[in-house]
Image (spheres, grey):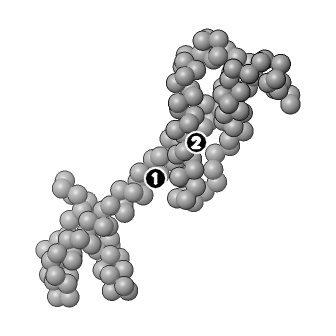
């Protein structure tokens, strides 16, 4: 297993981003061919590329999700939520609900990959609570002070 990890690390340091994805110079190919079959080097190159893409995807998803938590959290306040429920928001309430469900799941998944602190979820969590209480009598929904 250690040899494969070494190969992946060497390929990651040698590979260059080209128009066709990650590539190795002819010199690098020759060095790797001394110890590895072409198929092994190609497979390792694919794994390194997929790992880099996964890292980019995770970073982009983390950034997008944090921003959506912030934006959707604006609807967590009682007045903003009531305005959205009354159809006065630029985003319809059903779309807000769909976004909240998807972002919540994305946040769960990102916890595995995230290095830094998660975004402030207070407004977002309040919005989830409002959406969960949708259809409940108005007197049952707590005031913003609570």
Q: Quadrant of residue 30?
A: bottom left
Where does label 1 land, which residue? 58
Name the residue at 64% across, 54% down. 117
Nearer to me, 7 or 15: 7
Q: Quadrant of residue 123?
A: top right
| Residue 145 makes an appearance in the image | yes
User: Residue 38's x, y, as percent?
Assistant: 15, 77
Going by the image, does 5 lie left or right of 71?
left
The residue carrying pointer 2 sits among few (fewer than 14), some (14 to 19) or many (20 or more) residues within 10 Å by Cα, namely: some
Question: Of residues 133 and 35, which is closer to you in this image?
Answer: 133
Tag 2 residue = 104
User: What residue is drawn where x is 78% and y is 17%?
Assistant: 138
SS class, disc 1: helix
Q: Residue furthest right?
A: 146
The answer to the question of whether label 1 and label 2 lie on touching residues, with beta carbons closer than 8 A, is no
Which circle, 1 or 2, is nearer the viewer? 2
Residue 119 on image: x %, y %: 64, 45
Which residue is rendered at x = 68% and y = 41% of the image? 121
Upstream in the sequence, badge 1 or badge 2? Answer: 1
- The quarter of the picture where the N terminus appears is bottom left
Inter-mark Cα distance, 1 to 2:
15 Å
Q: Is residue 106 above or below residue 96?
A: below
Q: Residue at x 63, y 50 (%)?
A: 118
Against 71, residue 51 (above or below) is below
Residue 50's place in the image compared with 30, above or below, is: above
Residue 85: assigned label: none
Q: Position of residue 69 (x, y in %)?
A: 60, 37
**Horizontally, is 5 left or right of 102 in the view?**
left
């Amino acid at each position: 297993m250690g040899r494969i990890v070494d190969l992946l690390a060497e390929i990651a340091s040698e590979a260059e981003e080209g128009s066709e994805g990650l590539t190795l110079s002819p010199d690098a190919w020759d060095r790797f061919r001394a110890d590895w079959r072409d198929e092994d080097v190609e497979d390792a190159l694919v794994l390194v590329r997929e790992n880099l893409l996964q890292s980019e995807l995770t970073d982009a998803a983390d950034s997008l999700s944090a921003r959506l938590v912030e934006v959707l959290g604006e609807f967590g306040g009682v007045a903003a939520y009531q305005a959205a429920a009354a159809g006065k928001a630029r985003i319809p309430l059903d779309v807000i609900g769909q976004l909240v469900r998807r972002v919540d799941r994305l946040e769960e998944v990102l916890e595995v990959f995230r290095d830094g602190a998660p975004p402030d979820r207070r407004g977002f969590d309040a919005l989830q609570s409002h959406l969960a209480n949708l259809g409940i009598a108005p007197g049952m929904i707590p005031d913003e002070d609570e």
